[in-house]
Image (cartoon, helix red, strand yellow):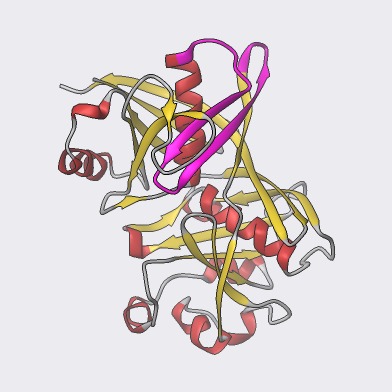
Amino acid sequence: MNFYIVDVFAEEKYTGNQLAIFRGAQSMSDKEMQRLAKEMNYSETTFIMAEEARPAINGGNQLGYEVRIFTPTAEVPFAGHPTLGTAYLIQREIIKQSVETVVLNLQAGQIPVTLNYKNGNPDILWMRQLPPQFGKTFDPTDIAPLLSLDRFAIDDKFPIQEVSTGLPFIIVPLRTLNSIKQCHINQERLAAFERSQPKAFLVFCPETYHLQNDLNVRMFGDDYGVPEDPATGSGNGCLAGYLVQHHYYETNSIDIRVEQGYEIGRPSLLLLKAQKENDQIKVSVGGKVIMVAKGELI
């Protein structure tokens, strides 16, 4: 069984978010996949269950490749960088010809990934995420100490809110890059925090390390066994919906560049597009994928 390592949302090799991808995993048990995900010790590992496109069991009008996603501690229904990275691998190693779209059949539903090419090779990949669902809001006085921040680090012009495009995140608007740098999870506060299911926190601010970027982001996913992620496609998809829903840029659409991972030495770049039409928000997250290594499971 072959497996691959790719960097997702990477501008060059050894940046972005690492992903391990296993092919032909239909003979593997859930326990084996979970053990391999723990062994790889990345934020997620994906398993391509079959090498031909099939109808989705849970709905969808296109043929897609069945893919399962595991963190080191649990299976998840959707995650962003595994979706882009796996679509890239399927085009390069399984389809082996230029195609406009690769569809993944995930537990959360069908996710189409659009591929743009440069010199015959995939360049920017875009995934259309499920429409964002908006949940409860939270009081800054409860969230600030959980993130080890002063209450006034939070930008109270916008709400702290749970948003999901398949995986729920609590979106927290901060004022400055200095607050982003100081942010870390207070484990005692997290243990006492009331929530109905596992969630991750995504904090963002308008100050950036590089002027060409629009936002800086950090993600903390302790509930999923991921203390911090260098690039979070699912979380940034939630953020894109949040920005449009709350008119962060005073408009019903966005097309922005988001930097992430600088605080942990894995600088990443994510591209976000979102547009609100007839009370529904369409969200797309894009970025580059770079092949790093190929191996064989023995």
The residue at the far bottom in this view is: 141
Left or right, residue 122 beside residue 90? right
Q: Residue placed at 42% from the left, 57% from the top? A: 228
- Spot occupied by residue 221 in the image (x, y as percentages of width and height): 40, 61
Left or right, residue 292 beside residue 252? left
- Spot occupied by residue 188 in the image (x, y as percentages of width and height): 32, 81
Viewer-closest of 88 and 143: 88
Q: Quadrant of the N terminus?
A: top left
Q: Where 59 sits versus 65, above or below?
A: below
Q: Where 32 sits versus 12, above or below?
A: below
Q: Main secondary structure of the magenta part?
A: strand
Q: Where 109 sits versus 244, above or below?
A: above
- For the image shown, how many numbered marks are present on the structure? 0
Q: Is residue 16 visible?
A: no
Left or right, residue 92 beside residue 131? left
Residue 97 inside the magenta-drawn segment: yes
Q: Quadrant of the C terminus?
A: top left
- Spot occupied by residue 78 in the image (x, y as percentages of width and height): 44, 48
Q: Residue placed at 62% from the left, 59% from the top? A: 239
Q: Residue placed at 47% from the left, 78% from the top? A: 148
Q: Residue placed at 84% from the left, 65% from the top? A: 250
Residue 272 inside the magenta-drawn segment: no
Viewer-closest of 29 and 213: 29
The residue at the far right in this view is: 250
Q: Which residues are magenta?
A: 95-121
Q: Is residue 143 visible?
A: yes
- Spot occupied by residue 295 in the image (x, y as percentages of width and height): 28, 20
